[in-house]
Amino acid sequence: MTLINIVSGAVYSKGHPLKEKVQIYVTALVFLVLLYNSPAGLVLYWTCNNIFSLVKNIFYKLKRPLLVLYACMCALALALDWYTLFVQSGFLYRRLMLVASTLLVFFAPLIRKAIVHLADTVFLTDKRTPLFLLSGTCLALLCGYAIPSYVISSSPMEFSFVEPHASPFFFLAHTTWQALGFCVFWPAAIYFLFGKRTQATLAALSTLLAFGALINAFLFSGEYGTISSFLAFSEAGALSPSKRDALVNMLALIVPIAATYAAFKFKKSSSLARMLAVVVIALAGISLVHSTAIAREYGRARSIRSHDATQQGEQDAPAPIFHLSKEHQNVMLIMLDRAVSGFVPYIFEESPDLHSAFDGFVFYPNTASYADHTLVGAPPIFGGYDYTPVEMNKRDSEPLVKKHNEALLTLPLLFDSNGYKTTATDLSWANYSWIPDMSFFDAYPTIRTHKTIRAYTDAWLKLHPEASQTAVQSEILQRNFIWFSFLKCMPLVFRDTIYDDGFWWNTEHDLEYLHDVISNYAPLDFLPELTDAASAQNTFTIFVNELTHEPQFLQAPDYVPRTEVTDRGSSEFANSESYHVNAAALKRLGDFFFLTI
C-alpha cells in the first residue's frame, strides 16, 4: 500500500513544488503507521483506491488515453485467451466460454456506440425511471419468489421443517429479500447517483435484462431431471447445451433487444412500461397460486408430524420397534431406494467377511424395475403384478393415490390376516406424500407403522461428533435458491458455469448431502438397538431406507459418514459416490444379519 501511495504521489505531483511532493510522501508514511494494524478490508480499499487513481493519472497524461486503454485491454484479453487455451487444463467448454467473453473487448468501440445510441433514444422519453423500477421489480419478483415457488410447490414437504425453520415460506421470504437487494435497492442506489443520460442507459439495459430473463426462464427452462432438496440436478450433464439449442436461445434473445430498441426509437416506451406492469401482475398471480399450494401441503406436513408424534412419540434414543421371534418365522422385506445392484458383487469382493454375513441369501443379478422412478416402480414391489403400470392403468377411473396405497397395504394385510405380527416403516410415497403419510393404516390397529428416516439423526450425531455439521440444509438453501433463480434467468451457455457441478460456488462441497445421508444411515446403524426377539408369533417386517438414494463419499473401509472424508478406499469404484452409499447400506445390513442370525 505504501509503495503504491508513493508511486501514485510521484506521478500526480510531477512538475509540482518540492513542498507539495514532500507532503504527499510524508502522508504515505503516516498512513503506513496508522493503518499497519487495521483490518485488511480497510487497507485493501485504500490500496485499490490508490491503484485506480494511479492508473487514471497516468492515462490523463497521455495524448490519446482512450486509444491506449483500448490497446491495453485488447493485449490483456489476448494474453488471457492464450493462457486459457494453452495453459489452463479445465473443461474445454468453459474455457471456450471464457475466450468468447474476452473477445468482446475487441468490439468495445462498437458496443459503446450502440449503448450511447440506445441511451440517446431513451433520453428522449420521460419513462426512463418507471421503466427502470418496473424492470427491477419484475426481476426481483421472478428471481425472488416466482422461480423458487415453482420448486417448493412441486414438493413442499421437502422444504418443510428444515431446522431451524418449520415453514418453507421462510426460504421464499429470504430469497425475495435477496432479489430485492440485487435487482431493486442497490441498482436504484446507483441509478439515482447519475445524470439523465446515464440513467437512460441503465433503464434500457434493465429493460433488456427483464425481458431476456423472462424468455430464458419460461421458454428455455431446460430438462435437467429431478432436483434434490439441496437444489442439485439428477441430469446435470444436460446443463451443457447443444450448439443448436444455444444458437436458438441466442437468436430468441434478439427479439426483445430489437423490440425494445424499436419502442424507444419510435417513442413507444409507454407500451414497454405497460408490458412490464402486466408481467409483474402475472408473476404476482403465479406466486399466489404457488403459495396456496405450498400452504396446503405445509398444513398437511404438520398434520403428518402431529400424527406420527402421537403414534410413536419422540425418537431421541433408539428403542426396539422390530420385534422378531426366536422360535417362529420372521419375514422381512427391505427396500433400499435407488440402490445399484450391479455394485453388489464388487462390494462382496472388497469385504469377504460381509459376503459370509449374507450366507443363505440368493443374489439375482438379471432383474429390472418396472419404472425409473420410485413413485411408479415401488407399487409392484409391495403389491405384486396387479400394481404394475399396465395393470394400474386399466383402472383409469380410480385415483392413482388410491391404487398406490392399496399396493402398500397388500402384503401387510395378507400377513396380518394370517397371524403374523406386522410392522412397516417409511413406506415409499405413502398417500402420495414425500414424507410418508401412513395414516391410512390407522384402520388396521394390529399393523404397526413407524418412521425411522430422520428420526434418529440427533441421537446418532451425539454418539459420532466426528460427523457433526458445519453447514446445515437451511443455510445451504438460503444461498442456493437465489443462484438457482439466476441460473434459470441466464442464457443456456452460462448455466453450467453457474451450477458449478451442483455446488453453486459453495466451498463446503462435502456437506451438501451429509445431513440426508446421516438421516438414513442412522436407522441402519441402529438396527441392532431397534430390534429385539420378544415376539411369540410369526413376524413380517417392511423396512424402507433411502441411504442409497443420495450419492455421497463416506469414510472407507467401513463407509461411515464423516465431515471430512480422508480415505475413500482402494476399490476400483473408490471415486464413485454411489458405490460408497451402496457399500455402507450392505455393510450395516450385514452387521445386523450377522448379529441377528
Image (cartoon, rainbow, N blue to C red):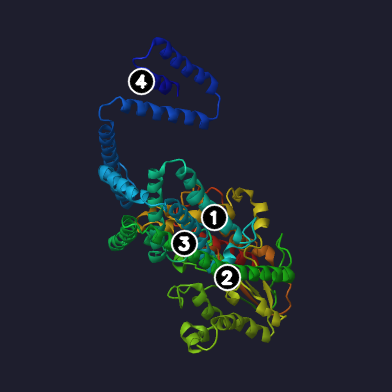
Residue contact at pointers 3 and 4, CB within 8 angstroms:
no
Q: Residue 391 appears at what percent x and percent y?
A: 48, 87
Q: CA distance from mark 3 to mark 2?
A: 25 Å
Q: Nearer the viewer, mark 3 or mark 4?
A: 3
Type of amino acid at the residue the image marks with label 1: Thr
Mark toward the start of the polypeptide (3 vs 1)? 1
Give the CA separation, mark 4 to mark 2: 65 Å
Residue identifier under label 4: 11
Nearer to us in this view, 242 or 570: 242
In the rendered view of the protein, which quadrant contains the C terminus? bottom right
Q: Tell me residue 307's x, y (percent).
A: 70, 71
For label 3, the residue is 277
In 3D space, how far apart are the residues under numbered discs 4 and 1 (Cα atoms)? 47 Å
Earlier-in-chain disc, 2 versus 1:
1
Q: Which residue is mark 1?
A: 175
Q: Which mark is residue 427?
A: none
Are discs 3 and 2 less than 8 Å apart at CB?
A: no
Whether residue 135 is situated above or below residue 437 in the rendered picture: above
- Mark 4 Cα-neighbour bin, 10 Å: few <14, some 14–19, many ≥20: some
Q: Secondary structure at mark 3?
A: helix
Q: Nearer the viewer, mark 3 or mark 1?
A: 3
Q: Nearer the viewer, residue 314 or 145?
A: 145
| Residue at 48% from the left image edge and 72% from the top image edge | 373
Instruction: Give the quarter of the image for residue 224.
Output: bottom left
Residue 335 against residue 405 in the figure, above or below: above
Amino acid identity at mark 2: Ala
Mark 4, secondary structure of its residue: helix
